[in-house]
Image (cartoon, rainbow, N blue to C red):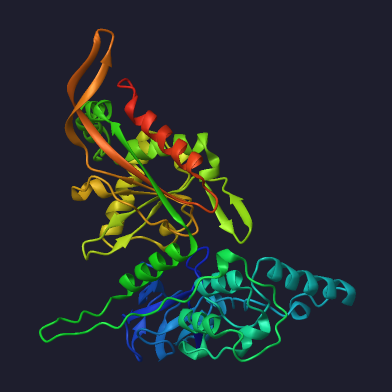
Amino acid sequence: MAEYKLLLPSMGEGVMEATIISWLFNEGDVVKEDDSVVEIATDKVDSDVPTPVSGKIIKILKHKDEVAKIGEAIAILETSAQTEAITEQPQIPESRPDVKTELPNLEPEVLKALETSMESAKVLAGVPATDLYLSPLVKSIVQQENISASELESIKGSGLEGRITKEDILAFVKNRGQGSAERTVPVPTPVAQVAAPVQVPVNVSAGDEIIQMDRVRKIIADAMVNSKRISPHVTSFIETDVTNVVKWRAKHKDIFEKREGEKLTFMPIFVKAIVKAIQDFPMINISVDGDKIIKKKNINIGMATALPDGNLIVPVIKNADQLSLSGLAKAINDLAYRARNKKLRPEDTQGATYTISNVGSFGNLMGTPIIPQPQVAIMAIGAIVKKPAVLETKDGDVIAIRQMMFMSHSYDHRVVDGSLGGMFLKHVHDYLQNWDLDTEI
């Protein structure tokens, strides 16, 4: 018999850790290869972790509500020696592997140069070289506040296993400089000089109900506050005549459903118009990294989706510019279904470069959406309402009943000015208002 360490597998790009939700087996239980043994949560996606080997669970190392890093052992299984030899799980290196151990045959000068370049890359990325584990949110604060490695190592973390939490780093920033007169780090730019939020006391009266936020709501709350802290939001509005869009969908929805077995909603039409506008104005499809602008090659559209429990999740349509209307409809329906039935994979919610939110599905005319970081813009689509509108005809102006809709475009004023934000919105408006009734699907 042999012992086998079950490691937390990679959950996709940018995912560094996961929270244990529940174990599906107990210590002493026998599991078979590919059995799902534990439920985990990464960001806002829940998923199962299967075991690649058969055996008996002899020790659970990470219990419910504990956090595990990618590559960290979460359980120990007892397996046959033969199984262990065949399916031994490769060890995932630490985030800063020892270069000399990994590359023993290189010349000392080459090794030294590699070590130096690795350290320099971390400094250039805005995060000082350190052995401490930092979450993406903490890293962003470290970068903005120009916190050095020595300062980081002086912070006593209050998180699991002494990790530095968001509250720890914000408290350090608030009290920074009070205990020491000597500092060699650069003075932060005005954008980074943001005071830590002050918690206002809440009075609880008799009869008030106290409801504990669930994990997803905490994540959403942190993300929204962080976005407003990082990005100066500006929102532009426009009213669009979507009568042609409504007519076109009414003409094709039954044919499409019979042919494809899929519903044809308005969302693929909206996404198509946004993609065209992004191609016209690619500087909307960017992210900000310190004082650098990252212009994205791919157009990945996030689609805000309300869940049955009242929470929100944003699955991503990858490479939306490469999909036809039919392909967009299928992708949107698939993501929406899997989101509402908790079948999304972690990678399904990653990599968005622009987001759309359909507030009209709740009967709202318009909204002021908050930008999902690190994107720089988001579009809110309002309800389609029949209204009297003035039409220009060859015989003069007339008043007619039209299908009208408001759109709201929030953008990051650090890098998107009113001209760019406004012109982008106007182009989406033009594509929808002038929708060709002969468009094929």
Identify the image quadrant of residue 272. Answer: top left
| Quadrant in the picture for the C terminus | top left
Q: Which of the pair 229/302 is nearer the observer?
A: 229
Q: Residue 133 in the image: x percent, y percent?
A: 57, 80
Q: Which of the pair 301/440 is nearer the observer?
A: 301
Q: Residue 328 in the image: x percent, y percent?
A: 37, 40
Q: Is residue 259 left or right of residue 153?
A: left
Query: Is residue 240 depicted above or below 357 in this figure?
Result: above
Query: Is residue 393 depicted above or below 272 in this figure?
Result: above
Identify the image quadrant of residue 226. Answer: bottom left
Residue 322: tell me if it is visible. Answer: no
**Residue, far top:** 395
Query: Is residue 124 depicted above or below 60 in this figure?
Result: above
**Residue, far left:** 207
The residue that appears at 70% across and 77% down in the rendered structure is: 185
The residue that appears at 44% across and 39% down in the rendered structure is: 422
Q: Residue 388 in the image: x percent, y percent?
A: 17, 27
Q: Which of the pair 148/256 is nearer the observer?
A: 148
Residue 30: tell me if it is visible. Answer: yes
How many numbered markers are drawn? 0
Q: Residue 120 in the image: x percent, y percent?
A: 75, 70
Q: Which of the pair 141/177 is nearer the observer?
A: 177
The residue that appears at 21% across and 79% down in the rendered structure is: 211
Q: Is residue 328 left or right of residue 257?
A: right
